[in-house]
Amino acid sequence: MRLLALVLPLLLPPRSAAGLNASSAHHRTDAPMAVVEADAGDQCYTCGFREHSRLLRLHSIKSQILSILRLEQAPNISRDMIRQLMPKAPPLTRLLDQYDPRVEEEDRGTTETIITMVTNPDPIAQGDLASCCSFSLSPKIQPRNIISAQLWVHLLPADMLSTVFLQISRLKPSKEGNSTRVRVRSLKIDIDTGAGSWQSIDIKSLLQAWLRQPEANYGIEINAFDSRGEDLAVTSAEPGQEGLQPFIEVKILDNPRRSRRDSGLNCDEESVESRCCRYPLTVDFEEFGWDWIIAPKRYRANYCSGECEFMHLQKYPHTHLVNKANPRGTAGPCCTPTKMSPINMLYFNSKEQIIYGKIPSMVVDYCGCS
């Protein structure tokens, strides 16, 4: 745009000799305006290149997710199918509003939410202690980095208004080899008739005890007895109860926050900054038409855009002009992410199974010239 602004006066039709002096005088008075127009053109170039960077980042995110999940194309799961599958899944509809795959906390660092489904215990290793429920915990979960831990249990519908006593017992081996059950939580819950319900129980202390003594972790036993002594807790995948087994939701403090000295510039969309900068970008998977992604429905991805010419411009003015004329040119350093981090994702695969996985390099933390 700047080159065009400079060349354009040469393409104007010739003026009469009588008007040359007036034209010259007019040209002198308009000199400041020419500078303003050049600056405006420079800003137009910056905005256009920023939009190009944003669209390129969105395309990269879509390709990266499919590649990491080893999908040639997005699973063909419609919204109607999602509605049919969701009621049988864990209470994701209640979690989605709270689900934050990655939250920046100013002083504490980065948090992650990890959802762990129940696993079948090993009857050979546990003997008569083989009972629901066992959980295979991520090695990232450590006693000191647990912020919160919730056990989610589904209760079957009751035939009548009833008070249910939900009991959580820790399974431990005794010295005699017999089973030992130590009650760790007991809740009194009033439930209505006609519909099942999900209940959450705080198990942060229990989880920390598991991690400090992993050899004594034989799982837990879950019971929810109504007034007639019937157990309403769903602990196994009986026909018609698929996806209703217990699961654990753990929020952990991940990596400590890095020093800000090399964090680079942070800008917003209204910024007139032309240097390399990190800009906010929210990715909305529903806008992609990707209903198969359960959580997060949207997340803050960010992108990098801007020029890397602070020390470069004065030393290599020709390269600067080449970059102006060709934004996709390779001359000089480029504005790229210098640190990226992953997000956690819950999604349906092509077999209509709910999968939990970590997608690397999905969030731009810092931008710089390289």
Image: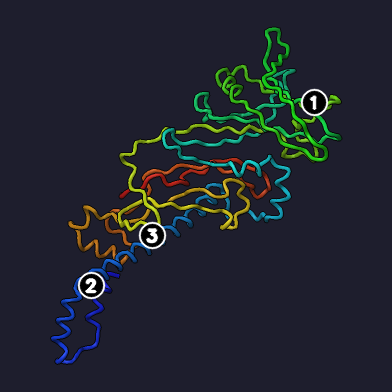
Any part of residue 361 in sight? yes
Q: Quadrant of residue 323?
A: bottom left
- For the residues labelled 3 and 2, the Cα–Cα distance comes to 24 Å
Q: What kind of residue is marked 1?
A: Phe
Sequence-earlier tag: 1 or 2: 2
Check disc 3 and report its element: helix, strand or loop. helix
- Side of 8 relative to 62 (left or right): left
Q: Give the total number of marks visible in the rendering.
A: 3
Sequence-earlier tag: 3 or 1: 3
- Residue 224 point in image, percent of width and height: 77, 27
Q: What kind of residue is marked 3?
A: Arg
- For the residues labelled 3 and 1, the Cα–Cα distance comes to 60 Å
- For the residues labelled 1 and 2, the Cα–Cα distance comes to 83 Å
Check disc 2 and report its element: helix, strand or loop. helix
Q: Which residue is mark 1?
A: 225
- Residue 339 point in image, percent of width and height: 39, 43
Q: Residue at x 21, y 58 (%)?
A: 313
